[in-house]
Image (cartoon, rainbow, N blue to C red):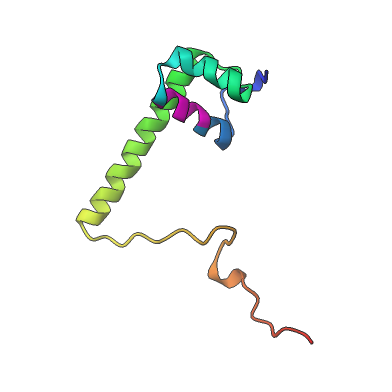
Amino acid sequence: MSSWVTGTSLTPGPRRMIDRAGAAVPFTPAARLLADLAGLDVNAEAVQRTAEADGRAAAVAITARAEAIRTRTPVPLPPPHGRTSSTSRSTAPASR
């Protein structure tokens, strides 16, 4: 099992797995499930801390988005996946 996950920094993939497992079942079974299915070495307290912190962050983001909708404040869309701006496309003519 990978013990690096028990540290303070998690990559997005394991963090999402922890969040989903922590939301689906109690924290102790979630830790065992993560170990069995993904080889993640986390304890119940780490599952709880991670899932609750990410839940709070999601609530803040949802509240901000709802307020923007309520006040009709324009919210820019993120760039398309894989692109950083609309100028990333080449405008040069194709060579023959």
Disc tally is 0
Residue 46 among magenta residues: no
- Please provide percent x and percent y for residue 64: 29, 46
Residue visible at 64% across and 21% down in the picture? 39
* 76 left or right of 82 in image: left
- Please provide percent x and percent y for residue 32: 54, 14
- Please provide percent x and percent y for residue 18: 50, 26
Q: Which residue is at the far left?
A: 70
* 48 left or right of 90 in image: left
Our reading of the magenta stretch's main secondary structure is helix
Start and end of the magenta stretch? Answer: 17-23
Indicate whether 82 appears above or below 64. below
Residue visible at 57% across and 35% down in the picture? 13
- Is 24 in front, or is 89? 24
**Quadrant placement of the C terminus:** bottom right
Q: Quadrant of residue 4?
A: top right
Indicate whether 25 appears above or below 70. above
Residue 77 seen in render: yes
Q: Quadrant of residue 41?
A: top right
Residue visible at 38% across and 35% down in the picture? 57
Residue 19 among magenta residues: yes
